[in-house]
Image (spheres, grey):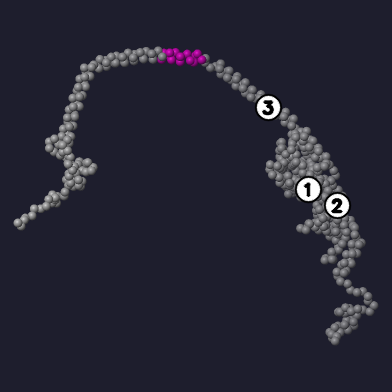
Amino acid sequence: MADPFLEIARREGMGAGLGGLVAEPAPGDNAAPMSVGELAGKLKRVVETEFGFVRLRGEISGYKRVSSGHAYLSLKDDSAVIDGVIWKGNVAQLGFTPQDGAEVIATGKITTYPGRSKYQIIIDRMELAGEGALMALLEKLKAKLAGEGLFAPSAKKPLPFLPRRIGVVTSPTGAVIRDILHRLEDRCPTHVLVWPVKVQGAGAAEEVARAIAGFDAMPLGDRPDLVIVARGGGSIEDLWAFNEEVVVRAIAACSIPLISAVGHETDTTLADFAADLRAPTPTAAAEMAVPVLADLRLTLAGYGNRTEKCARRYAERGRERLDALVRVLPRRDALLGPQRQKADDLGARLDRGLERRVVVARGQLDRSAGALRLATLDRQLERGRDRLSATWRLVESLGPNAILDRGYAFVSARPSGAVVGSASAARSAGTVTLHFRDGEVDAKVERSGAKAYDGTSPEQPTLL
């Protein structure tokens, strides 16, 4: 059963002469409707078939490189703008770093992006549009880096006078490294470390930057004292790798003194501004790096001669001053004559004094010898014996044994042998010894009031 609402709407639409609300096949119409995706696919095939290879000239705008490695930008002129894509593999093959405002010629194919219904160019190769555009890009990058202070004179490091080890960043197969080695050997043989790199073409800037950073990251005992970044002459396109921002920043960040020797004297790159010293040629860089060994030897010999002359002149002047002082000094005899005379006088006086001292001592000895007669000595000895006998008699009369002859006795404690002089001391001792003239008797002290026991039986009355 048909829907009444749809039927009414169909009649009203047909009556109005306009398209109806619901699509219906019309008589004689053979155009089947297509989807948006089908249309986008057809447009993509048509565009890619018609514009499979194009070269566009325009100014870069909105350049950015995403984390995936692909780059996106827009090419514009005074009347139109087209989006562009550079895939990761092609970005690495570019000979320069794209920047906004640079005029380039891009080669690739036109395609569409169905997700946004926009057409764009897939860029396979990109070149700067002439030397004027290249110089404009160079001046823009130079102004940018100079504004960051990478070219400031205060950032320049002094070169070592006589480097023991020199690092060279250059191509290992070119004539540059041979010229540097020959010049170093002629002037002052030095240990050289060569870091081989590409000096032009795709990837050359990255290799040079990695080589500089590699020298800077070496251990202190192995790293070079000086780095030379060298390349032979060429066009501005050939030298463009040394104008890349990555190389300039690597040179500015290097803690080792660095000499830039890129191209000939008339060639100038941004690496020359960032380096600590610019050499007009690689050979000149070798000459700036080390002094001439013969000149060093000659200079050292000259310093040695000047030092020797100075020492000799100092000695000669000292000798002259010494001779002048000797002339004004008094003679030895004049200085020592009075002292010698005084010594002789004192010696004579000493002899006389010793003789006089001997005579006086002999007189005293004679007088003392007269007083020391034998009879006098006998009398003095007899008087001494008498005094000793009297003293001994007094000692015997005062000794404890003298009273024993008169019937007395003295008491000593046992077993210490100390003399007992009181009754309390005797009671304390308990056992004492009585000393008599003809011997000793041991006794036991009894307390007062105690009845002595004589060991005999008491006498009892008998009943018988």
Q: Nearer the viewer, residue 107 or 128?
A: 107
Q: Quadrant of residue 193?
A: top right
The residue labelled by disc 3 is: 304
- Give, as a three-letter code, the residue at label 2: Glu
Q: Secondary structure at mark 2?
A: strand
Which is closer to the viewer, label 1 or label 2? 1
Which is closer to the viewer, label 3 or label 1? 1
What range of the chain is rendered magenta? 332-346
- Give, as a three-letter code, the residue at label 1: Glu
Q: Nearer the viewer, residue 70 or 135?
A: 70
Q: Is residue 309 left or right of residue 444?
A: right
Is tag 3's residue or tag 1's residue first in the polypeptide sequence? 1
Q: Judge the density around disc 3: few (<14), some (14-19), many (≥20) Cα neighbours within 10 Å.
A: few
Q: Is residue 206 above or below residue 78?
A: above
Q: Which mark is residue 196?
A: none
- Give, as a three-letter code, the residue at label 3: Gly
Q: Is residue 269 left or right of residue 425?
A: right
Q: Quadrant of the N terminus?
A: bottom right
The residue labelled by disc 2 is: 127
Residue at image x 29%, y 16%?
A: 365
Q: Quadrant of residue 64?
A: bottom right
Q: Main secondary structure of the magenta part?
A: helix
Whether residue 220 is visible to the viewer of this picture, yes or no, is: yes
Residue at image x 60%, y 19%?
A: 320
- Please tell me whether residue 344 belongs to the stretch shown in magenta: yes
